[in-house]
Image: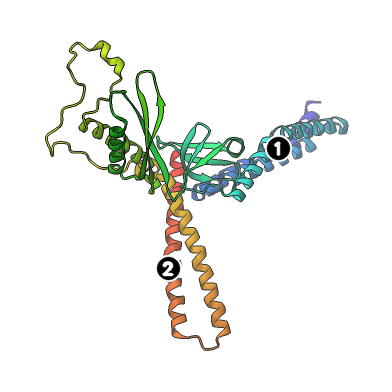
Amino acid sequence: MNLELLARFLGPLVVVALLAGILIALNWGLGRLIQRHPEKSFQKQLFMLIITLLMVVIAVVLLPISDNLRGQILSLLGILLSATIALSATTFLGNAMAGIMLRNVRSFKIGDFVYIEKYFGRVSGRGLFHLEIQTEDRDLLTLPNLYVTNNPVKVTRESGTIVSTEVSLGYDVPRGRVEEVLLQAAKAAGLEEPFVYLVRLGDFSVVYQVKGLLTDVKLLLSARSRLNGEVLDALHCAGVEIVSPNFMNTRNVESASFIPKVLVEGTDARVESKPEDIIFDKAEQAETLEEQKDALVEIESRLQDLGNSEKKDTQPTGNLKQQEERLKRQHAMLKDRIDQASEELTAEKQADK
């Protein structure tokens, strides 16, 4: 009896073991391939999922059980698979459709500064199902495309954006004097066409807001900090006290003025830096890569136009040949740069994982 039962299950067990071995070998081989092409990891996972499901169906078919029981097991697997697809299809297809819509609308591109609800950063990657932005902390934030389409998206324009800061001053300071000082500070911060808003008349102070146009939007964070510093220095140099008038109640010496002493000229050594180069490094690389790809497409189009011109002209001039050779050299150099940049981005993604 035991020998008959063993003989009955031996064949299916051998087949199951063989199928398991095939799965392990496929997983190992695809893993080696993914190490050289990490961008194809999603295809590998999808392929392994399909193969695994197929192997499970084959194993169930080969089990030495009655046709009725086999049919029930296959029906159960079908129900489970259908329920899984139905539950996940809404989000899956929704993100895919949202990604297609975002690409067609083209409201932003890689390298742009975006505000999405409470998130701010620079776009460093776009996919069919998600959007990746690099935040002010240099971290990478992944947002589903459905979230992006369901929330307002504010995009910083390449032509320039308004940078602003506000300060509250006492009623004893003349408004004209404040506006003059704030405008000087905005110009010193490198902003164009500065202007001042009188935002609010409070119970104890007046709230002023100074704004100006920043044309180099890649220096957005530095410009905000620089504007705050220039406003602080300009008000102190003008003898304007910034502390709240309520602070009078806690002073020990009534005649004291809470303005820092003017430093000796030359001792205020401030180093100009661009933290954006560190914070948004991946977004900058991604933007440069996209620009190079666009330039490559343009060169290919020009080469095609030159080829058509040569076909029409049976005796092409030397000028056309020189242009074609120059474009081919540019194409080769640009292609090498794109390949190198793609490899660097891929290596960074693997390092982040």
Return the mark for residue 330.
2
Q: Position of residue 167 (x, y in %)?
A: 34, 28
Return the mark for residue 64.
none
Q: Count every numbered label the image shows and give the total.
A: 2
Element on which disc 1 rests: helix
Vertical arrangement, residue 260 with respect to residue 136, above or below: above
Q: Nearer the viewer, residue 76 or 96?
A: 96
Vertical arrangement, residue 236 with respect to residue 93, above or below: above
Please, what is the three-letter code of the amino acid marked with disc 1? Answer: Val
Q: Position of residue 250 (x, y in %)?
A: 25, 11
Return the mark for residue 16.
1
Element on which disc 2 rests: helix
179 on left or right of 90: left
Q: Nearer the viewer, residue 126 or 253?
A: 253
- Residue at the image point whose x is 37% and y is 27% from the top: 207
Q: Position of residue 307 (x, y in %)?
A: 54, 77
Q: Quadrant of residue 10?
A: top right
